[in-house]
Image (cartoon, coloured by chain):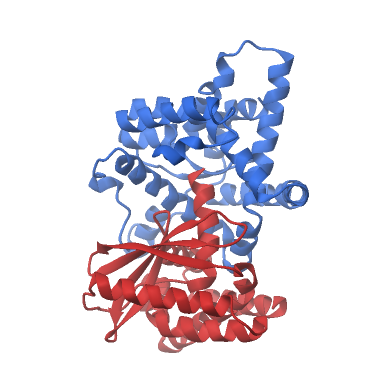
Amino acid sequence: MQFRRFLLMAAAVAPMVGLMAQGAKADPISASEAQAFITTAGQQMAGIVNGPGNQQSRATALRTLVNQIVAVSQVGDYVLGRYINIATAAQHTQFQDLFHQLLAYNITYQIKAYQGVSFVVNGTKPQGDDVVVDTTVTTPGHPPADVGWVVEEVGGKPQIIDVIVAGTSLRITTRNDYASVITDNGGNVSALLNAMQHQIQKLSADS
Amino acid sequence: MVARKMMAAVPGLALLAGLSACASAPPRSDVADYQAYRAVNDPLEPTNRQFYKVNDTLDSYVMKPVAEGYVDVTNQTIRDHVGDFVSNIGEPARTVNFILEGMPHDAGVSLMRFVINSSFGIGGIFDPAKHIDLPETDTDFGITLAIWGFPAGPYLYLPVFGPSGVRDVWNLPFAYFATPMAVVPTSTALTDFGYAETGLHLVNTRAGLLDTIDQIKATALDPYATFRSLYRQSRASEVVQVYQAEGRTPPAWAMPPSN
């Protein structure tokens, strides 16, 4: 039951952040600052998803917002994990580019399913130097999902660095997904880059 | 009843898996790769992936179409009540497990949930217990073994049942016996009820995951690895939740890694 519940909740938040990870060295952030940040960000996300315009324009607006509130590059480095030390500079650059593209396509692919989404902020709890803002995300046709947004101060401003659903980290899930592709191909980072390109082509054809 | 028969076969399936193809471990001298291999803890990965493909094919041609048809002829409210009904049948097993885990508060809540939902909830179709501060906390024999100190062990992907592990697989034979139907005298009506309950459970669960599984398959680079990671993290989280529901601080070994 728990695994099923997790999967349902994961689906509710996946398009919001897509692919998560940790930030670089960060300063501590206050609970009130993190809560205010997520309250505003949640309202903005819901406003875009439920707002006027066609699906393409809303997806574009959401991608812009996600790039502002999520530490996407740091997330990418976390997801690459230990292979960041194996990748060449060119591969690292290409990975970051593909990672940003994949996030954009994932948002476009999934935005349609989240019409009517709403957020309620329930409180905060510390997690190391970070703050987890607990929310309830409600989407029509799905059970309410308890979602924790991990906020860290990156570059002097609060940024989302992970999403916790039923105690499960989306950034760790994504890192394990990517690591599996690399290890199944003899530790070759280029295999991951090829898989990401293939995925982008597939999502592009579907959108 | 079908599920109970299948559950009885699971230890055998686990043994079969144990005799099957194994993944090649990197040499210990390659420290980073070897540590990563140990962390994944999926030595039967080639066999597990074969079973994943089998299940995926079965799902695509049988379970998913049936679930889509079920969604067409029901609404979310009906599906929620079916979920409550199936969950209520599993409540006695949870009570027993909480007792075995040494969690008296959780056991009391679980027992009261079963009594209240079976009566006022009309056989569990409704869940009035959650409205009087008796929320559901999930557990099973795999969680009990974890709290007793057994590690998760290697990952297993089972035919039909899906993600599991060498520790968690023992929940299946346990669940075979820990059901209210086990104490009812055998009859044709009970057998029919068992078929209906098992079928409804499978279809209702799959219906609730239609969008989710589609999304994971569409966005993950390696869906097998993604489901493996989700399963592992979810199981670790369940152990923590059992402690927290009991009002106890989870021990350090139960806490998930921070990175």
| Residue at 65% in and 50% down | B76
Question: Chain B is which colour?
Answer: blue
| Residue at 42% in and 54% down | A166
Residue A84 place in picture, x, y as percent: 38, 77
Taking the image as shown, residue B40 lies to the left or right of residue A197, namely left
Which chain does red denote in the image? A
Q: How many numbered callouts?
A: 0
Res B184 quadrant in image: top right
Q: Residue B136, can we see it?
A: no
Give the quarter of the figure containing the C terminus of chain B. Answer: bottom left
Residue B68's place in the image compared with B115, above or below, is below
Residue B141 place in picture, x, y as percent: 43, 31
Q: Residue B176, can we see it?
A: yes
In the image, B181 versus B126, the foreground residue is: B126
Give the quarter of the figure containing the N terminus of chain B. Answer: top right
Residue B124 place in picture, x, y as percent: 57, 31
Taking the image as shown, residue B167 lies to the left or right of residue A194, namely left
| Residue at 61% in and 26% down | B4
Residue A63 place in picture, x, y as percent: 53, 83
Res B3 quadrant in image: top right
Q: Farthest residue to the top: give it.
A: B185
In the image, B252 versus A28, the foreground residue is: A28
Res A73 quadrant in image: bottom left
In the image, B138 versus B254, the foreground residue is: B138
| Residue at 25% in and 63% down | A126
Residue A180's place in the image compared with B122, above or below, is below
